[in-house]
């Protein structure tokens, strides 16, 4: 089919606007070239706004939806600038497509990376519609306004819907950047309000949305069995016996690679349905070569860490002043050892992917946080050109960083290459817990000192962490796991005159990956628990101690001149507001206590106060959590933002209370929620107060910033209630009886 752009737009009966998102560009550059917006014979969703002649407006959500609400919030930005009523909007999930620019959900970056561009796109579309109406009515565009999907002329009381303007608007030239004016936030009707998630009705009624719900004609089911020891390989397996079982279509060895985060070796079983696949799996017998990591254990790691902790670190990330001399001169000193285990992401929807190898194309349906990484891993591992890999994004039943990895995607693709049909790979819960890409455990050996005025004069943290051996530029090195690098600027680095931050890696064969609020999810607990120890050693109020430590500077620049400065004023504001709203300083009886903490994480400034009750027997109840957050000048969806903060608090509390994996013989001991419990409803705080400070700073995300301060706030509250200092995660391993 050959047609001009005008013929295609007229024939399709719609106005199509596209946007490329390479960063901050002018509005004229942000609207895609007309020729790139359409395919020869069909429309493909490589644009963000479609307006039909019927007036129906369809907005494309390009980011992966993993429960964080981005499928609702980013289209809200478009709808606001387009002056649309939300009930008149249709939202569609976009697939992986280079026309959309970057597509990933991680680091709380979806909102800050797209907010301004989406504002500009919506405003550009609105201006085109206004100009179309101005041309039709032969009126100055300055006299026209928009409202609820219509262009209005107040003087003549004319009113025309966007749908009626489609043919004319489609022919309008793209306006110049300086001609596009964004709406005044004072006139917002959608942004900052509570809007329910666009998928909510389908979620609560059980409609198919998630990767595990995908069904294709002739679809088969696969299960994939890997060595229980990370890095192990298949020596032999009873494949012929498995192939003879009812419903089994095939069974074969996947040789895999040495990439701990990629396609690992294993045995695939493909069957007509789930029951046949899992029944055959129970009869599978594999002789494993368990490899070099079969002797590793958590107990052994603890012994190594305790040997290394008192020694100088392998790497020094910050050295200011003379810590040893300052500690000798300090009025009070504190020494502490903090420990936390490996933990799993444990998303409720286990890893899964549906793959279909047909006509030279690998077609994939996956709940992924990073579809581009999945495409790249499949291409590099299986030798399929990227342009022959088509990936459809489904909604994810939780991610928390796990679905930034793509091992389950490449596993499904490798199996599909052997099968002449669509095949769905679904991990069991045991697979999910025992073959995760874990949040690394760690050990912090701390020394601190305060002077006679109660000021911090010395800080020393030797961080012993976990690392995998990798080849880079021809060299074998130990690379710390994701979130396992303790930077020299980590608070209170830059604030303490005598500061030493060191790190030593422990080699392991355990795959590690991003875990919600990487790094800060545990650094905050360690740092703000130890700050609390110093405050009590100095005999000072923990709130005022922190305010004095922050100081009166406006901002503190990064040491290396790169990265965002730390805005002290914003942190002071959230800290003081949280304390005020929580009733900080009002007396509580023995057994009840308040704890406070703050964290600058993923561009957000957050402070929390936890109020707890601990019985004499050590039973903990978190009664109330007060959260104050500064994430910039605009909350996009108030309902979604509140849910994100509340979810962070509950997730962080469950992690603090229960999450723990043991390692024996190079394998994970825990296998299901029976021995890896999640937080229960009765354990959740009955009251979580969420407050946002609106400031004149760029809009940022919220999936991670509210997570880190919860653990130290609760542990500091436990100390205030009982005198018991928690230095080991999870709480289930601590005796909380009154000291």
Image: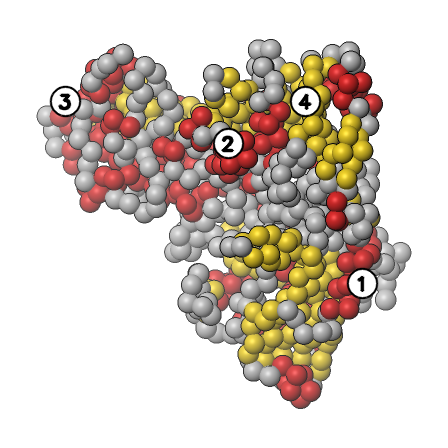
Crowd band around label 2 with a 10 angstrom C-alpha radius: few (<14), some (14–19), many (20+): few
| Tag 3 residue | 136
| Tag 4 residue | 222
391 with respect to 613 (left or right):
left
Q: Earlier in the sequence, mark 4 or mark 1?
A: 4
397 with respect to 286 (left or right):
left
Quarter occupied by residue 720: bottom right
Q: Earlier in the sequence, mark 1 or mark 3?
A: 3
Kindly identify the residue that appears in the image at 58 percent across and 15 percent down: 420
Quarter occupied by residue 323: bottom right
Label 4 secondary element:
strand
557 with respect to 580 (left or right):
left
Crowd band around label 3 with a 10 angstrom C-alpha radius: few (<14), some (14–19), many (20+): few
Label 3 secondary element:
helix
Q: CA distance from mark 3 to mark 4?
A: 59 Å
Q: Earlier in the sequence, mark 3 or mark 2?
A: 3
Q: CA distance from mark 2 to mark 1?
A: 43 Å
Q: Quadrant of the N terminus?
A: top left
Mark in the foreground, 3 or 4? 4
């Amino acid at each position: 089919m050959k047609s001009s752009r005008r013929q295609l737009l007229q024939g399709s009966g719609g106005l199509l606007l596209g946007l490329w998102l390479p960063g901050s560009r002018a509005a004229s550059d942000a609207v895609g070239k007309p020729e790139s917006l359409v395919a020869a014979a069909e429309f493909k969703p490589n644009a963000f706004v479609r307006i039909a002649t019927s007036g129906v407006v369809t907005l494309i959500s390009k980011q992966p939806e993993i429960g964080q609400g981005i499928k609702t919030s980013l289209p809200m930005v478009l709808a606001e600038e387009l002056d649309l009523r939300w009930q008149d909007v249709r939202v569609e999930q976009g697939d992986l497509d280079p026309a959309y620019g970057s597509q990933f959900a991680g680091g709380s970056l979806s909102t800050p990376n797209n907010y301004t561009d989406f504002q500009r796109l919506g405003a550009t579309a609105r201006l085109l519609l206004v100009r179309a109406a101005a041309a039709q009515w032969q009126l100055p565009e300055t006299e026209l306004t928009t409202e609820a999907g219509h262009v209005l002329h107040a003087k003549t009381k004319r009113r025309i819907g966007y749908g009626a303007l489609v043919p004319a608007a489609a022919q309008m030239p793209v306006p110049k950047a300086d001609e596009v004016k964004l709406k005044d936030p004072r006139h917002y009707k959608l942004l900052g309000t509570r809007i329910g998630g666009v998928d909510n009705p389908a979620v609560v009624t059980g409609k198919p949305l998630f990767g595990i719900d995908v069904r294709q004609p002739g679809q088969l089911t696969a299960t994939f069995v890997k060595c229980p020891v990370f890095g192990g390989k298949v020596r032999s397996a009873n494949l012929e016996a498995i192939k003879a079982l009812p419903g089994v279509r095939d069974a074969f060895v996947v040789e895999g690679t040495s990439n701990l985060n990629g396609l690992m070796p294993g045995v695939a079983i493909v069957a007509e349905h789930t029951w046949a696949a899992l029944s055959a799996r129970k009869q599978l017998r594999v002789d494993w070569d368990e490899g070099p990591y079969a002797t590793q254990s958590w107990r052994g790691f603890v012994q190594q860490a305790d040997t290394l902790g008192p020694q100088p670190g392998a790497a020094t990330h910050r050295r200011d002043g003379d810590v040893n001399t300052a500690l000798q001169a300090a009025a009070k000193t504190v020494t502490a050892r903090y420990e936390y285990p490996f933990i799993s992401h444990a998303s409720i929807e286990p890893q899964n992917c549906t793959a279909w190898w047909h006509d030279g194309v690998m077609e994939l349906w996956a709940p992924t946080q990073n579809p581009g990484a999945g495409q790249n891993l499949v291409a590099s591992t299986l030798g399929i050109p990227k342009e022959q890999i088509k990936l459809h994004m489904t909604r994810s039943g939780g991610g928390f960083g796990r679905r930034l990895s793509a091992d389950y995607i490449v596993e499904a693709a490798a199996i599909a290459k052997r099968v002449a049909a669509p095949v769905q790979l679904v991990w069991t819960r045991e697979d999910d817990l025992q073959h995760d890409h874990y949040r690394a455990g760690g050990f912090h050996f701390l020394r601190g000192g305060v002077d006679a005025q109660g000021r911090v004069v010395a800080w020393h943290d030797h961080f012993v962490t976990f690392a995998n051996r990798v080849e880079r530029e021809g060299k074998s090195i130990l690379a710390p796991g994701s979130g396992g690098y303790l930077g020299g600027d980590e608070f209170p680095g830059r604030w303490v005159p005598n500061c030493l931050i060191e790190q030593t890696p422990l080699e392991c064969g355990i795959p590690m990956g991003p875990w919600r609020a990487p790094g800060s999810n545990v650094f905050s607990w360690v740092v703000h628990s130890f700050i609390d120890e110093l405050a009590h050693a100095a005999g000072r109020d923990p709130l005022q101690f922190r305010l004095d430590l922050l100081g009166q500077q406006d901002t503190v620049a990064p040491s290396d001149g790169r990265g965002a400065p730390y805005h002290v004023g914003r942190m002071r504001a959230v800290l003081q507001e949280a304390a005020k709203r929580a009733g900080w300083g009002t007396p509580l009886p023995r057994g009840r206590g308040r704890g406070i903490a703050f964290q600058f994480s993923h561009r957000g400034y957050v402070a929390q106060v936890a109020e707890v009750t601990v019985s004499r027997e050590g039973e903990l109840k978190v009664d109330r959590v007060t959260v104050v957050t500064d994430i910039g000048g605009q909350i996009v969806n108030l309902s979604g933002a509140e849910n994100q903060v509340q979810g962070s608090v509950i997730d962080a509390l469950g992690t603090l209370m229960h999450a723990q994996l043991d390692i024996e013989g190079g394998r994970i001991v825990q296998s299901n929620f029976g021995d890896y419990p999640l937080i229960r409803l009765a354990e959740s705080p009955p009251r979580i107060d969420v407050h946002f400070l609106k400031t004149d700073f760029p809009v940022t995300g919220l999936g991670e910033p509210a997570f880190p301060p919860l653990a130290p706030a609760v542990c500091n509250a436990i100390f205030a209630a009982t005198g018991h200092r928690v230095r080991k995660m999870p709480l289930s391993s601590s005796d909380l009886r009154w000291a």
